[in-house]
Image: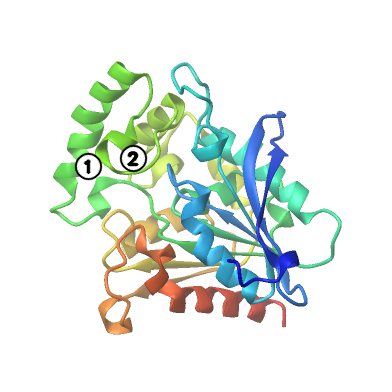
Amino acid sequence: MSQLPPGARPHRLTLPAADGYALAATSYPAIGAERARLIVAGATGVPQGFYRRFAEYSSARGYSVLTFDYRGVGESAPRSLRGFEADFLDWARLDLSAVVDQFSAGGDAPLYLVGHSYGGHALGLLPNHARIDGMYMFGVGAGWHGWMPRRERPRVWLMWSVIGPLITRWKGRLAWSMLGMGEDLPIGVYRQWKRWCNYPRYFFDDPTVPEIAEGFARVRTPILALNATDDLWAPPRSRDAFMSGYRHAPWHGIDVEPASRGLGKLGHMGYFRQHAEPLWAGALDWFEGLGR
């Protein structure tokens, strides 16, 4: 980081969500001429710092990059999550939507979105999805245990049926950090996540929220969705089940066999670790192809 020119160094900032809630964010200015602007929409319970290397790599390729923490996560979390009200819909409709509005203002450069896991769900939940010129998704899936490998299904069942209810009753939040699985989560996020993971097509199968499917049907943004074959939580068939909800968007799926690509193990989190850099190059190349 110290080798970057002063104007290109990342800087912290605070952005207001649509309801005024303060969101912690980090801006990575483009090095050289700006090709485009890029927002990173992270996975559930993953703080923005996890995406730093990807953001720096993209910045060096001429992208102005913004990472941020959803409310209740990382530096956007209050001191205590007990009694804190937030859910997945808030993360998209209040947090990410405001980030999109603010980062797209005052410039003519294309605006792209990179989504990891939940970040790929969020596009169809945005009221302003039309502002996004293209989206690249990593590890997006429907969340249902039936799409996962057989050895993973008992662990997921145990989490939702035993461990999750016990921890949330005790702590008033999903104490994800106690299990070494990420940041603690607001109780509203936990409840939605647990409910929707009971359905093969996630929230599209939930009869109480038909407006979600209607919103996804309005998306026309070009999308590329990449999934590793060793991603236990979001294997390719889970992606295909979920992505059917983007039924009017031009989307394409890519299956990556990590061993054959010399990438080692990817799983659900390895897409943004250093050894996955060839995948980052592919994502940026794809964005640049959209602009031609």
Query: Helix or strand or loop: what does disc 1 sit on?
Result: helix
Of 79 and 223, nearer the camera is 79
The residue lying at 58 percent from left, 33 percent from top is 90
Amino acid type of the residue that numbered disc 2 sits on in the rendered structure: Cys
Q: Is residue 160 left or right of residue 268?
A: left
Q: Is residue 229 visible?
A: yes
Of 259 and 69, nearer the camera is 69
Question: Quadrant of residue 112 in the image?
Answer: bottom right
Q: Position of residue 189 (x, y in %)?
A: 44, 32
Q: Position of residue 17 (x, y in %)?
A: 69, 35
Q: Is residue 89 left or right of residue 163?
A: right
CB of mark 2 within 8 Å of CB of mark 1? Answer: yes
Crowding around mark 2 (Cα neighbors within 10 Å: few <14, some 14 to 19, many 20+) is some
- Residue 227 lies, with reference to residue 162, above or below; the image says below
Amino acid type of the residue that numbered disc 1 sits on in the rendered structure: Val
The residue lying at 47 percent from left, 16 percent from top is 83
The residue lying at 65 percent from left, 71 percent from top is 4
Q: Is residue 244 visible?
A: no
- Give the spatial CA distance, label 2 vs label 1: 10 Å
- Residue 1 lies, with reference to residue 200, above or below; the image says below
- Residue 198 lies, with reference to residue 223, above or below; the image says above
> Which quadrant would the C terminus be assigned to in this image?
bottom right
Point out which mark residue 156 bears: 1
Query: Helix or strand or loop: what does disc 2 sit on?
Result: loop
Q: Position of residue 56 (x, y in %)?
A: 58, 67
Q: How is the image coloured?
A: rainbow
- Residue 12 lies, with reference to residue 94, above or below; the image says below
Q: Position of residue 183 (x, y in %)?
A: 40, 39
Give the number of the mark in front: 2 or 1. Answer: 1
**Residue at which label 2 appears:** 197
Of 70 and 177, nearer the camera is 177
